[in-house]
Image (cartoon, helix red, strand yellow):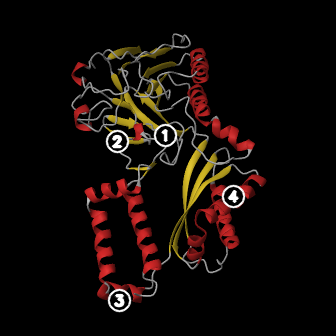
Amino acid sequence: MQKVSFIHAADIHLGSMVHFTGSPPNYLEEKINEAVFNSWNNLVELAILKQVDFILLAGDIFDREQRSIKAADIFYQGINKLAKENIKIFMIAGNHDHLQDYQSILSMPDNFYLFSAEKFESKLLMFKDFTVKIIGRSYASREETRNNLKDLQTEFANFSIVMLHTDLAGQGSPYLPLNKKEILTLSNVDYWALGHRHLPQLIDKKPTIAYPGVLQARDFGELGKGGCWLVELIDKEINKIEFKNLASLEFKKIIIKLTDESDLETFSDLIDILQKRIERLYLQADHNSIYLLEMILKGQHPISKLLSEQGSEGLQFIKDELNNQLSQAQLSVWIERIVDQCINEFPISKLEELKDNNPLYQELESLLVKLLADKELKNELLQEMGEIWTTRTNLEESNPLQFEVDDDQLQYMIEQSKRYILNNLFSGGK
């Protein structure tokens, strides 16, 4: 019985930074700034600890096609450590680190292989009792529209792996236009080592189709733990596949329902409630991790009027007070933002009267229903709101000068607008 093991990782984005606001204390800021680099170092240490036979890196290992010297050096140091342990590394380039005009900054040792962008290549690994074939192709430019699965050769191996950087979105995608049905037509492939999606997914087990997600999350669009897949083969079959957390920082959203908080009258009371929720989180947390928090206030409560009156200045005050307390306690927690989604409800009796008797309210209600249902009206609304807002249609082309709004956020904004109109225009029931 022979055991072979490997790591499947992707989307490390070396050279990018974790996105945060404000001025965290020095003991946190340095760790936040180094989090992406530390995730790569953690992967190297895991590979050595588990004595894996090889590592698969399925694209976007660097954040840009022009590698920074710091990112290249940290990557090179890791590859050298792995070389000393006889661990091989196979890498494809993705849309962020594509090979157009690529020039290596540092010469890599013999244990590292970067697949070409010209065509699919394969590498055959010979073990005592069976063989493993690894097939891959890099991106030639930022977009990859070639779909040449028919060129794949998967014979002459007991276990075959294909590395692809794709969103599996099918025809029309600029990121290797494939879908699950197409790749399943290749019956000789045992493991599809995919990259591009930033959340870990085990899409199928026979054959295995897997995304490891990012190694280290960089914003609230990448919630959860970042890491890689650790795969163990025994006698040409997958015996175990396990997700390994390698991130030193995690983004978390915490929802605080204020409806049942009877002792809540002032901002001081609210700060105490939020502090207790953070303490509860920290007691259950991994104390080796840093947590960047978004705290969302929900529910119907009299304090919602005070929150509404004070607006962003009040929320900033609460956030600053809490972050000062966390810094004094030397906790590895930083509050990125506090969001007020409390309901300042219009009296039900007045609302029913308006529905029956007020033509202006009836017109308002009809317009809001249409805004939520009609795609063209939604787009028109976004245009009226200004160029700073955009729908998130392409995660790879996000603009840091724009706020991305999805359907849920737009619905929330419309509901908040409705409450504002009710409480200001119809407060007298007229």
Comparing labels 4 and 2, the label whose residue is closer to the camera: 4
Q: Quick one: label 3, few (<14), some, or many (20+) residues within 10 Å?
A: few
Query: In the rendered view, does 294 fall on the left or right side of 287?
Result: left
Mark 1 falls on what kind of element? strand
Q: Residue 428's image quarter?
A: bottom left
Amino acid on which disc 1 is placed: Phe
Secondary structure category for the residue under label 2: strand
From what the image shows, is residue 12 above or below residue 250?
above
Identified at 46% across, 84% down, the residue is 427
Which quadrant of the structure image shows residue 418? Answer: bottom left
User: Quadrant of the image for the C terminus?
Assistant: bottom left
Task: Residue under label 3, please give it.
Answer: 353
Q: Nearer the viewer, mark 3 or mark 2?
A: 3
Q: Which residue does the image show at 37% across and 22% down from the upper left?
A: 141
The residue labelled by disc 4 is: 320
**Where in the figure is residue 182, as x and y percent of width and height?**
22, 33
Spatial CA span between label 3 and label 4: 42 Å
Measure the C-alpha gap from mark 4 to mark 1.
36 Å
Residues at marks 1 and 2, CA–CA distance in whole angstroms: 13 Å
Which disc, if any, is residue 203?
2
Q: Residue 338: percent from the left, percent from the top?
A: 58, 60
State the residue in front, 289 or 342: 342
Residue 278, percent from left and from top: 65, 60
What residue lies at 44% left-to-right and 69% top-to-bottom? 416
- Element at label 3: helix
Counting residues from the N terminus, which is met first, the one under dot 1 or under dot 3? 1
Of 208 and 93, nearer the camera is: 93
Q: Give left or right: position of 84 versus 332.
A: left
Which label's residue is closer to the chain start, 3 or 4? 4
Provide the residue designation for mark 1: 243
